Amino acid sequence: MGIPNANCVILAAGEGKRMFSRSSKVLCEVTHKPMISWVIDAARGAEIENICVVVGNKDVEDAAVGCSISYQQQRLGTGHAVMCASDFLKLHTGEDTLILYGDTPFMDSDTIIQSYALHKQEAAVATIISARLEDPTGYGRIVRRSGRIAAIVEQTDTDDATAKINEINSGAGWFSTATLLETLAKIGNDNAQGEYYLTDVVSILIENNLNVSVYTAENPQVTLGANSPLDLLNLNDIACQRAILKHLQNGVHFTSRYGIIIGPDVEIAPGAEIMMGSILYGNTAIGKGSIIGPNTIIRNSSVGEDTRLNACQVYESKIGSNVKAGPFSHFRPDSCISDWVSIGDFVEIKNSNIGEGTDVAHLTYIGDSDVGRFCNFGCGTVTSNYDGENKYRTVIKDYAFIGCNTNLIPPVTVGERAYTAAGTTITQDVPDGALAIDRGELGLKEGWADRKLAAYVEKKNRLMNDRKQ
């Protein structure tokens, strides 16, 4: 069940200089998905429709498709970041606002929904999302009195007793939108950093005896963020192991726990097997009984049942069932491979449709082509689809036999049950049932090669004699 009368503000303007990234910090990826996308999906998974992302650079705006955007031109703290979303908040004054952070990818929809339920149950003006950590070092502590929150104490301000508290402030939480706007106007920046802090809003609410509650997350990983390459690596390690565990529980087989990356949006049917070195991400789906890997990359693609992809790369394509491909096959975007197709090694297919039962041997390039059923390609076949200015399609109809080293110069059609002889260049349509052969007249020049290679032969013989001495 989603959350009615609620909106979300995601703080995503951090530059992340310590990440040493050319892009904004929240665009750094965890299992090949930007951190900001994880957070937006968590909010949408809780059915929060109105989302505002506070950004500092346009690259984040481009990633926050479908969200409202507010800019934080100067980085003056978390409170200031929320202030930058004031125009958005004023449109939702009768609602509750969820504040999230764009670099905490493990915030999940369940935590959002359950914390909101507590927020409404206790009729709170604010509900802080906390977590209990074995090592709370570096986090602000939640100080309670009689079970209620009394203060949030930052790490630098803790005394010995407070430092032992293991309940920490995640930074995320729910606020009455009207109360949030009113209280933001009261916070100041009289501190060493000269910044406005969102925690000061909470302090003011507590000082005024307003009802502030705390929801302690069942999963402490919702608090984890990234401020360094090491932090990002740790997030990736956690995400990889979480993904493997989830799919294991669903009946997927793995040959190793390591060297495998599976994105959070990947679907794998029970009985499939994922081997070492495989990277699956984006909106990818793998059918039951398929074997992926080793060393296979699949992005935003679907793979049918009982298919074997060995050392392949697949991007934005559809692979059918009972397909065998690889090693070293490359499927570029917009390729559709039908059932029972066999793709050999060192084959590249781009923006093409390959019909049922067709065999494509090794060392072949098929681009911008429509290939029928039960065709056979000899090695070295090339569709020369680009003339430097325009791209053209090749059509190869059912049961056609394409001989080794055939060059097809589109636009051209090879008819049904047609045959091209090895070494032929096809520049015009081949009728159904015809043989196309173009080998020209063989010219011989006696003695030409002897003269051309004389110095080369002498050099090689001398080198070999030197090696034997």
Image (spheres, helix red, strand yellow):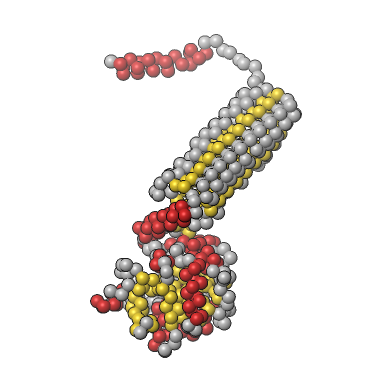
> 63 left or right of 351?
left
Q: Residue at x 50, y 14 (%)?
A: 449
| Residue 172 visible to the viewer | yes
The count of marks equals 0
Camera-nearest residue between 377 and 260: 260
Q: Is residue 300 above or below residue 25?
A: above
Q: Could you say where residue 268 lies in the image, as x and y percent from the top left? A: 52, 51
> 68 left or right of 372?
left
Camera-nearest residue between 36 and 193: 36
Q: Quadrant of the C terminus?
A: top left
Camera-nearest residue between 37 and 144: 144
Q: Residue at x 28, y 74 (%)?
A: 164
Determine which quarter of the picture holds residue 149: bottom left
Determine which quarter of the picture holds residue 132: bottom left
Q: Could you say where residue 381 lies in the image, as x and y percent from the top left? A: 60, 30
Camera-nearest residue between 210 and 363: 210
Q: Could you say where residue 246 lies in the image, as x and y percent from the top left? A: 46, 56
Looking at this view, name the residue that lies furthest to the left.
Answer: 160
Q: Quadrant of the N terminus?
A: bottom right
Q: Residue at x 57, y 77 (%)?
A: 5
Looking at this view, name the residue that lies furthest to the bottom.
Answer: 208
Q: Is residue 348 above or below residue 243?
A: above
| Residue 138 visible to the viewer | no
Q: Is residue 233 above or below residue 121?
A: above
> 37 left or right of 399?
left
Looking at this view, name the residue that lies furthest to the top.
Answer: 446
Q: Residue at x 40, y 65 (%)?
A: 221
